[in-house]
Image (cartoon, rainbow, N blue to C red):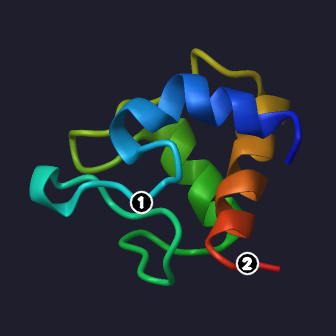
Amino acid sequence: MTRAAPIFQAQCASCHGPAGLGDQTQGVPNLTDQEWFYGSSRADIRGQIWAGKGGVMPSWKSRFDPETLKALAVYIHANAGGQ
């Protein structure tokens, strides 16, 4: 969690917002609720970060190492109430 928070702020917050609330008017999903388009498990979230989705979110597989991808998935999952 500690490792991923600054990465989220630097790389993800520009679209999803600093708190991860997204912007539905722009088609940017809220990452803090229980509504998920492509699955809500940590593995699902990691896959979405890795591959990108919907032709809008870019793939981050070439930008982050596997440990960082996992840390971001855990961070996002936890912020949405996941255990």
Residue shown at 88%/40% (left/top)? 2
- At label 1, the amino acid type is Leu
Separation of marks 1 and 2 at Cα, in angstroms? 16 Å
Residue projecting furthest to the top? 63
Badge 1 element? loop
Q: Nearer the viewer, mark 1 or mark 2?
A: 1
Q: Is residue 3 above or below residue 82?
A: above
The residue under label 1 is 21
- At label 2, the amino acid type is Gly
- Marked residue nearer the N-terminal end (1 or 2): 1
Q: Quadrant of residue 7?
A: top right
- Binning the other alpha carbons within 10 Å of mark 1 as few (below 14), some (14 to 19) or many (20 upward) gives some
Side (left or right) of 61 relative to 64: left
Quarter of the image where the C terminus is located: bottom right
x, y percent for residue 48? 50, 50
- Binning the other alpha carbons within 10 Å of mark 2 as few (below 14), some (14 to 19) or many (20 upward) gives some
Badge 2 element? loop
Checking the image for residue 9, the label placed there is none
Residue projecting furthest to the left? 25
Q: Is residue 2 above or below residue 43?
A: above
Tag count: 2
Residue projecting furthest to the front? 18
x, y percent for residue 76? 65, 57
Side (left or right) of 40 relative to 69: left
The residue under label 2 is 82
Residue shown at 53%/42% (left/top)? 49
